[in-house]
Amino acid sequence: MQKPTYSVVTREQHESLVAQAYQHRGYNAEESQAAARMCSEASWHGIRTHNALKALHLDELFGSGTGGCVPDAEVKVISSRFEATETWNANRKLGQAIACDAMERCIAMADRYGVGTVAVDNAFHYLWGGGYVMDAAKRGYIAYTNCTSTLAEVVPFGGKFPTLGTNPHSWGFPTQDAVGYPVVIDWATSEIAMGKVEQYKREGKKLEQPFGVDADGNPTDPFAVKALMPFGRHKGYGLGLLNELYGAAIGGSLPTLRGRAAQADGTGEKTTSAFFFQVIHPEAISGADFSHGRTQAENITKVVQDVLGHGNESCMLPGTIEANNAKLSEKAGGLLFTEAEMGGFRELAEECGVSAETWATDALPSFSE
Amino acid sequence: MQKPTYSVVTREQHESLVAQAYQHRGYNAEESQAAARMCSEASWHGIRTHNALKALHLDELFGSGTGGCVPDAEVKVISSRFEATETWNANRKLGQAIACDAMERCIAMADRYGVGTVAVDNAFHYLWGGGYVMDAAKRGYIAYTNCTSTLAEVVPFGGKFPTLGTNPHSWGFPTQDAVGYPVVIDWATSEIAMGKVEQYKREGKKLEQPFGVDADGNPTDPFAVKALMPFGRHKGYGLGLLNELYGAAIGGSLPTLRGRAAQADGTGEKTTSAFFFQVIHPEAISGADFSHGRTQAENITKVVQDVLGHGNESCMLPGTIEANNAKLSEKAGGLLFTEAEMGGFRELAEECGVSAETWATDALPSFSE
């Protein structure tokens, strides 16, 4: 199979356009820049499902386009008697800006208390949880986040009606010394993303295993899927439910109304998401008693080598794919976009009155693996 | 199918024998009582895989019988500059006693800081993680624990050699107001337990899905299984790896040598497990902005009802089975044991010089559902 050819766009070019697109929609400079930077991070690491075009499309469907997200909103820190946690009312501020700030605050608290936690109510989609924990892990911290996804698309294990979000969990672990990049465990708790279901339908493909159910709760093929199944049966269900419980404790309301302003209208129920962030300072959990007098980082290296040894050398770590994609971006000297994506960016440039010339494919270097 | 008949043993009768068995092996009164209480809790909630007989068998194989666990060991709290976390050197003290104390300490820290965390190095098997988080959840807290399992029995996703423990995660969430019992999410990160593989072999059964691999890493049926697969493909793998990374950061050494004193002899590598405990005070993550002016508990109730509504009424929550078993124990007036289990207890009574008469089935009430 021929390797695809990409257009190479520098981070600066990319972030300039994306930030302008956000500002065009009323977001302030700071939140636009945070959003643009996280989109660059996603594309740099090959996360095509969370690139700028998707981010802006989501904003149109559920965000500033429909009131789910409020440009230039002000965050309110809820006063609390607890010293090492904070709860914020995001007032529907842009998720990427909130997430970057919350992770920063968690790090500051972890530096003092060992663990820092920020819970966020009245939140709007932060897009790519993996990006925030990866950032923190690169700075040497253990980081975690979960959130309630905008829409309920997943059935409880054995159920027939979608009452759970695809509710992702993301963990970052500083394993740079061991393998050159952080372990990033980052996935939705559904067997598959709804976007993939649509893709399978378009391509007329079937999957080996059922990943969704029909209206009666029976596992079925893509064409009859009404709702997604949790991954890993009751285990993934438990993990998806966890986000709903965190969300409920923080301030989120009924999952079946979340992100559905029209349906919730008149019910008095909130439709916003909730975020949970936590950072652990690795020194705070060190027993300082490592075999052979190793440092903590050396010990983590030995353990990772043991896991991937003994004939498991071809296995990947969670985070390997992202790290390999980052190497590719590094080699190409920028972010890699397909022709279809470039078309999307040209439309975006037109939308916000920026010259689309920069985004003409013949104006940019191309790259193929 | 006929329902089985059980002998009914009171908690007092049970804990008296089990504590004596632990003391007989050199454990002090306090740690023996903690172990006996957790065995009662497991049996009360129908967790047959973690009853007293299994606990004492494990102690024989990997614990006081072989030096993996040291009766009457003293815990040392490692001094640290962090205010809301503690790291303990368990010095191989009995896991159940450590876990009860660690959870208590987490609760005290959570009361002040919002989140309390205890990491434990040089640890020995705490048996049933679900029990500790359930206890904390019943007291109104959000609780979590993970640990590195004694033996590496699980392959990394796509691998062929077992380099990961069955590494469980356990979360407890205070949902008593919503459903009468806490949500307890508690499972190993393997597709199945090694004990089940043996059971399938004995019964000549095959499972629908492969849950293990042969020596070449190919998915296979029970009879050729050399190692277990992680549940949920790469997702469960990530979760199992997480415990190894926590363990490595705390002080654990190579997973392939853990719990294998003979193989580790002369290598200078530690063979102990590591524990991680965390408790969150629910008020610390409340945004105090619940729809219809609900309390946090009322809001959690509404969310749980929404998840299990809309045609999902027959779905269970993680923790439902345990709660139903507890109701059964309540109804029967004690712990329920099969005839085979009663035989085990009679042997145990003999082993530690206690009259076995109490454990004669005709001396006890019987119960059948």
Image (cartoon, coloured by chain):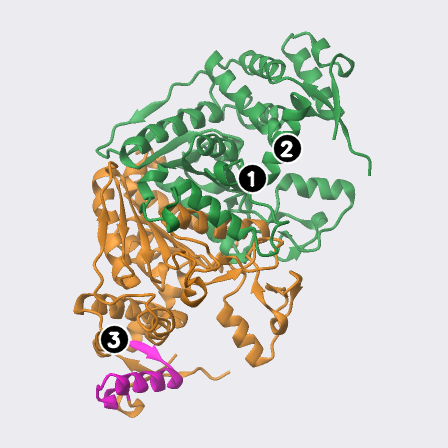
Chain colours: A orange, B green
What is the span of residues highlighted in magenta in the rendered image? A333-359
Which structural element holds mark 3? loop
Tell me if residue B213 is in the magenta stretch: no
Residue B109 lies left or right of residue A30; in this view the side is right
The residue that disc 1 covers is B319
Instruction: Report x, y in % for residue B213.
Output: 63, 53
Tell me if residue A357 is in the magenta stretch: yes
Foreground: A339 or B310?
A: B310
Q: Is residue B259 visible?
A: no
Mark earlier in primary sequence (2, 1): 1
On screen, residue A6 above or below A137: below
Instruction: Report x, y in % for residue B36.
Output: 55, 20
The residue that disc 3 covers is A25
| Mark closer to the observer (2, 3) | 3
Q: CA distance from mark 2 to mark 3?
A: 55 Å
Which structural element holds mark 1? loop
Q: CA distance from mark 1 to mark 3?
A: 46 Å
Q: Amino acid at mark 2?
A: Asn
Q: Amino acid at mark 1?
A: Gly
Q: CA distance from mark 2 to mark 1?
A: 10 Å
Instruction: Report x, y in % for residue B312.
Output: 60, 53
Q: Is residue B303 visible?
A: yes
The residue that disc 2 covers is B325
Most common secondary structure along the magenta stretch: helix
